[in-house]
Amino acid sequence: MDRNRIIQRVKERGITSQGETLKVLRELGRGGNGVALLCKGKIAGAVVAKVYIPPDSRDLDDRDVREV
């Protein structure tokens, strides 16, 4: 699975943090280690989440995809 598809999946599902699922509002930027996303939650309000994604598709396996 390539990085773009993983990032898209994270955007669609949101990010779980401290028992709350944060909705992804928009992407702020990408780099060699991942993506920064502007997120919003009911409890947390607006936050920036940095999601680590391995830089090369050879580093990905089925476990990485399931954990996203």
Image (cartoon, rainbow, N blue to C red):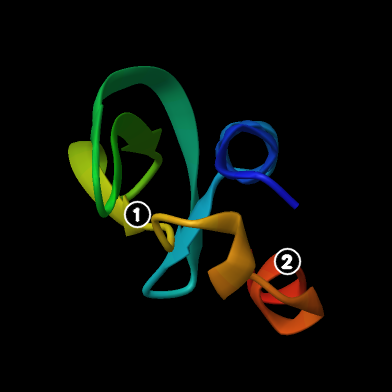
Residue 4 visible, this orientation: yes
Q: What residue is shown with label 2? A: 65
Q: Is residue 50 left or right of residue 2?
A: left
Residue 22 is situated, as x and y percent measured from the top left of the image, at 45, 45
Query: The C terminus appears in which quarter of the rendering?
Result: bottom right
Q: What residue is shown with label 1? A: 51
Q: Amino acid at mark 1?
A: Val
- Does dot 2 land on a helix, a strand or a loop? helix
Seen in the picture, residue 65 relative to 33 is either above or below; the reply is below
Q: Amino acid at mark 2?
A: Val
Q: Nearer the viewer, residue 30 or 24?
A: 30
Of callouts 2 and 1, the N-terminal one: 1
Residue 25 is situated, as x and y percent measured from the top left of the image, at 42, 19
Residue drawn at x 64%, y 31% as measured from the top left: 8
**Mark 1 surroundings: few (<14), some (14-19) or many (≥20) residues within 10 A:** some
In 3D space, how far apart are the residues under numbered discs 2 and 1 (Cα atoms)? 13 Å
- Does dot 1 land on a helix, a strand or a loop? strand
Q: Nearer the viewer, residue 47 or 58?
A: 58
Residue drawn at x 48%, y 73% as measured from the top left: 19
Q: Nearer the viewer, residue 49 or 17?
A: 49
Q: Nearer the viewer, residue 30 or 10?
A: 30
Query: Hey, which quadrant is residue 35 in on the image?
Result: top left
